[in-house]
Every structure is written in C-alpha cells, then in structure tokens.
Image (spheres, rainbow, N blue to C red):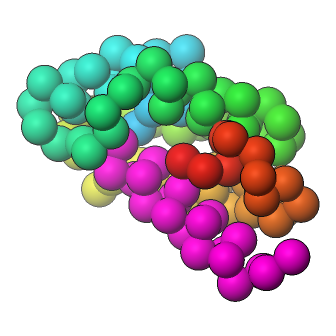
Amino acid sequence: MNTNFVSVAIGAWALALSLLNGCAAADCESVCLEAQARDCTVITNCNTFCSDVNTLADNAGCRAEADALDRCSTSVDACEVDARCGGEENALASCAVPYCLANPGARECQL
C-alpha cells in the first residue's frame, strides 16, 4: 500500500470537510445546504457527503469527534465554521486517519 497516496487522500478528505463548513452528524445536511445557499462550500451533493461522513465516523470509531463537530457547526454561522470549529474538524480528520490508512478503498475515505 502506498502510504503517501493514502496520506494525500486523507489530507484531501480533511480539506473537503473543512470546505464543507461543518457537515458531520445529524444536522449535517441542513448546515451543508445553508453553506451551499450562501456559496461558502464546494460540496455539490450534501446528502451523499453527509452520509459518507457519518459512515466514516461510525466505521472509524470517531462518533465522539463527529458529534463534537456537529455541535460546534450548528452553534455558529455556516460560513464561520472553519474559523470557529477548526479544532473539531482536525480532531475528526485525525481520528479517521488510521481507519483510512487500513481501508484506502473505502468510499467514505474518498471524501
């Protein structure tokens, strides 16, 4: 397995999560849709992305990190999530790294 490729994929996933501005758990779609309406995300399909983030959180054992990001993202303006919830975004991305290194072909690791 090429660990450099997997590391790049994880970095891309973290960037996509960051650009999403906060989709993580139960309210992911509403935050994502608001970010889309306000043109502050590059995510084109909120349903698919949020489903994949939730699958990743469950499969990687990162539900606590995903829930923390969800709590933060739903408590701030959708276009300010990056600035105010960066720690939670990074914690979720870091938690997911071992799972995605072990499962580089998993759809939820291709975010």
Q: Horizontal and vertical percent for residue 54?
A: 65, 28
In the rendered structure, the answer to whether residue 6 lies left or right of residue 53 reads: right
In the rendered structure, does residue 68 fall within the stretch colored magenta?
no
Report whether residue 13 is seen: yes
- Residue 66 vs residue 47, the one in the foreground: 47
Q: At x 54% / y 47%, what residue is drawn?
A: 111
In the rendered structure, the answer to whether residue 16 lies left or right of residue 109 reads: left
Range of magenta residues? 1-21
In this rendering, the answer to whether 109 lies above or below 97 is above
In the rendered structure, the answer to whether residue 10 lies left or right of residue 60 reads: left
In this rendering, the answer to whether 33 lies above or below 64 is above
Q: Horizontal and vertical percent for residue 31?
A: 33, 24
Q: Quadrant of residue 99?
A: bottom right
Q: At x 79% / y 31%, what residue is drawn?
A: 58
Report whether residue 88 is seen: no
Q: Horizontal and vertical percent for residue 2?
A: 79, 81
User: Does the magenta stretch mainly form a helix, a strand or a loop?
Assistant: helix
Q: At x 17% / y 42%, what residue is drawn?
A: 40
Could you tell me how many numbered marks the image carries?
Answer: 0
Q: Quadrant of the N terminus?
A: bottom right
Q: In which quarter of the image is residue 72?
A: top left
- Residue 22 vs residue 87, the one in the foreground: 22
Q: At x 11% / y 37%, what residue is drawn?
A: 39
In the rendered structure, does residue 19 fall within the stretch colored magenta?
yes
